[in-house]
Image (tube, rainbow, N blue to C red):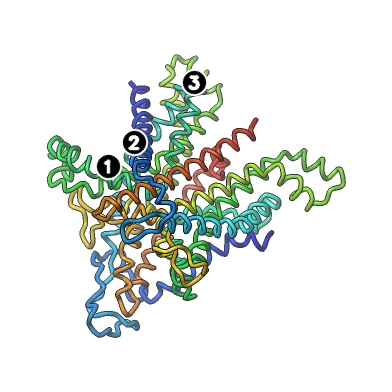
Amino acid sequence: MAVLGGSVPASVAAVVVFLLLYAWPAIRLNGFGFLVRNTWDLGSLYAQPIRHGGVMILPGAQYGILFLIVGTLLTTAIAMAIAVPIGIGAATFLAEMLPPGPRLWLSFLVEMLAAIPSVVFGLWGYAVLIPFLGQYVFPVMSQLLGWIPWLGEPTGSGYGLLTAGLVLSLMIVPLITAILRDAIATQPMEVREAAAALGATRFETIWTVILPGLRPVLIGACILAMGRALGETMAVLMVSGNALNVLPVSIYAPVSTMAAFIVSQLDSALQDPTGLAVRALAEVALALCFIAIIVNTAARILLAGTAVAGRLRR
Amino acid sequence: MGWALCGIALALLCISIVWIIGLVVVRGIAALRPSLFTTVTQGTGGGLLNAIEGTAVLAAGTLLLVVPFGLSAGIYVAEFPSSHWAKIIRFLADVLVGLPSIVLGYFGYVTMVEGLGWQFSVAAASITLAIISLPYVARATEVALAEVPQELREAAYAMGAGAGTVTFQICMRVALPAVITGVLLALAISVGETAPLLYTAGWSNYAWSGQLTHSPIGYLTYVIWAFINEPFSSAHALAYAAAFLVTTFVLLISIASRLILIRRRR
């Protein structure tokens, strides 16, 4: 048991160690500039490889992922900005306003959303959401809200930051809703009675007494959801427009994220005869890996000891 | 006013769910033909036989690997909860759950596809999927065993049963339904994942060759991703049919595990 159970630590260690070993030549070449440079360029594919900084590279090769970091952070931020209020609202309504029968069915419906594979979200985003947003919603939005920076023309075709954020928000909102709904349900009746005795309405009770008491749970759930959004691949790949080497100039502009970039760039990275491009992609994967570990550990620490810790481990 | 906003939030959520599932069901059923299940993919047309078979092979391979390792990890952590090794396993299982699947896919590519020279293959893909689903199975097993009443163990020990008998024959029997939901989740993951498979399974238009290494294999989620980007309506039909099959299967698994858990509570 103990030995077979060791497959869990072995897997995590192997992932970190092998990615680190494989990416090492790229890490040595790129240094810290990897994170702040904005150019991903494989160099001249037909030129003779040259020796640079101890590794063979193609002339002109340069690896910087600033645009990916910005894209990842912005799509996640937009997803959170949409998912957190909707998650709080839906969880409150589910827990407080519905009789047990509909509550069970609607909770189940929301949790079905979490079961749908990423690529199916991508399919929906690509086939339905992009034409809908690009032709109808975004032009109207830019007309009405164009005076706000980032929200004006041009609106583009529908591929981009806002669309990716919207799809991501749908993928993470079931997590926030489920954790918060369970947490609200576990709050003792006495608290509600005390608030009611002080003259609070039902909504005031939940809004000013119950929810503030659940702040650590909410923050933990949000960080967990954020971790998921940061690493989401297929759905983002299919709706983000996969921008290369440019920072977005508006909320409608194409972007790319670290996770999506790893998929979209493999074919071209394999063209590099020195193999350095594939190693640089491993460096992207390694960076994503560390971000995920930090974010998830933070969420677990915040949630440890709260009532939902048990549910999370399900 | 506040309740209205909360209701609108829930309504928006429900509309999106119905919209997504509706799209997949309506266009998917329209694209279903009997020949999908009997012919292999040809270019951007043909059938889905190779993809359906590949998904089944990968799912079987994943379960074969993840069940012994996942159950062992879960049983160990549940039975020796305060040992250092159990704490390490529990913490790293949480870390592993949080790792994006593309990171694990790239790891599979670096170590097995390239490092061991297996190329795109069933073995590389199944092992990668097994690592992705490992923490879910381990966690489900651990929670299932932890929920077995302590009195049951005490009663069994009082009857003179050894530790092995208590864990494997008595507690496991009670915990089995909840353990099965963990295995079902692993099945859903292996059928629904895409990104790590692009890096480990590749894609093949032909039926599985029977080789574990050095031979790429098709799978349904690839069809959804790759064929919806093609400009042909035959390709779109295949993508929607594949999306319908995958979504239906995954949702059925989700409903089944829910029913198992509800029945167990009673």
Q: Nearer the viewer, residue A40 or A139?
A: A139
In the picture, the quarter occupied by the N terminus of chain A is bottom right
Name the secondary structure under disc 2.
Answer: helix
| Residue sitting nearer the eye, B149 or A112 | A112
Say whether mark 1 and mark 2 are on the same chain. Answer: no
Q: Quadrant of the C terminus of chain A?
A: top right
Q: Which mark is residue B19?
A: 2
Q: Are marks 2 and 1 in contact (CB under 8 Å)?
A: yes
Q: Is residue A88 visible?
A: yes
| Element assignment for label 1 | helix
**Chain for mark 2?**
B
Residue named by callout 1: A128
Query: What residue sits right under mark 3 in the picture?
Result: A99
* Residue A306 visible in the shown view: no
Instruction: Estimate the x, y position of residue B59 in percent, counting from the top left.
Output: 52, 55
What residue is drawn where x is 21% and y is 46%? A158
